[in-house]
Amino acid sequence: MVLVLLARDSRSALVQWRPKPLSNAQYEEELLTSLRCGNRTVVGDLFELHRERLLRVIHVRLNPRLRQRVDTADVLQETYLVASQRIDEFLSQDEGSLFVWLRFLAVQKVVDLHREHLQALKRSIAREVGMEHASSAQVLANLIATTSTPCAKAIHAELRDRLTQIIEEIPEIDRNILLLRHFEQLTNHEVAETLGMNQSSVSTRHVRALAKLKSLLLQHDEFRDLLSQDFE
């Protein structure tokens, strides 16, 4: 509790008690308790707690070209509608964080969007747009090339393909850890839950993958400038 003194005049004071503000984690736990007791009206409040983080996930996973056609806010809204309809699936889990479950739904929605747009485009156009078979190496290469230091020059397609080939030297599981930690900004615990690994293994592989990525980029003069504080 927080003690607040409100002055009434120079001779006395009015003492008023206010509850200490809850942290986001405490507030989420209160909402989850209410949800588990049958109060479905709190789903929106719970979703709102993770809004910014889910927008980041959608932005990272959405193909840059497709991002020009699709508003990330619309994808987020569709994710919320799915979450509202499927909230019983989360409640039936013995353990697991709400954010990781919501992230799973958001990524599913992005995958569905890619599939829908690919089906709507002719194969030649789809190849031109660059939405076919995006591997974790391609996603990571695109993100590194576009979100590094401001002074880094834009990388044209040929160099980006070379960057993808370099990154493919890192095992896929380690590439995914780099994506989740540095671009989606998940915690080690959340990465472990997402990938079905223990937290100690994630930490070890993360350090090793980061060192490998830095080593690979430093071997190529044209990619040295891509190393930024994002990889500290």
Image: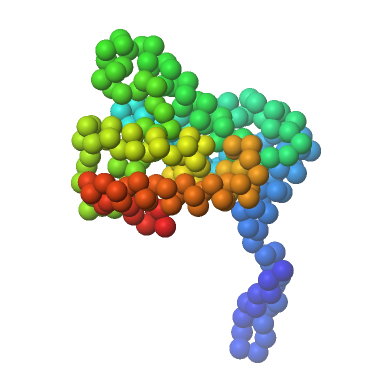
Q: Check the image and tell me how it is coloured.
A: rainbow
- Image coordinates for residue 3, horizontal then vertical, percent: 69, 74
**Does residue 120 appear in the picture of this structure?**
yes
The one of 87 and 196 positioned closer to us in this rendering: 196
Q: Residue at x 23, y 49 (%)?
A: 221
Left or right: 148 as drawn, with respect to 205: left
- Image coordinates for residue 41, horizontal then vertical, percent: 67, 36
Q: Residue at x 31, y 11 (%)?
A: 123
Left or right: 207 as drawn, with respect to 10: left
**Does residue 226 appear in the picture of this structure?**
no
Residue farthest to the bottom, as pictured: 11
The one of 206 and 79 positioned closer to us in this rendering: 206
Number of marks: 0
Whether residue 228 is situated above or below residue 44 in the rendered picture: below
- Figure quadrant of the C terminus: bottom left
- Image coordinates for residue 99, horizontal then vertical, percent: 60, 41
- Image coordinates for residue 2, horizontal then vertical, percent: 68, 71
The one of 1 and 229 positioned closer to us in this rendering: 229
Residue farthest to the right, as pictured: 37
- Figure quadrant of the N terminus: bottom right
Q: Residue at x 69, y 45 (%)?
A: 31
Q: Residue at x 49, y 41 (%)?
A: 174
Whether residue 78 is situated above or below residue 118 in the rendered picture: below
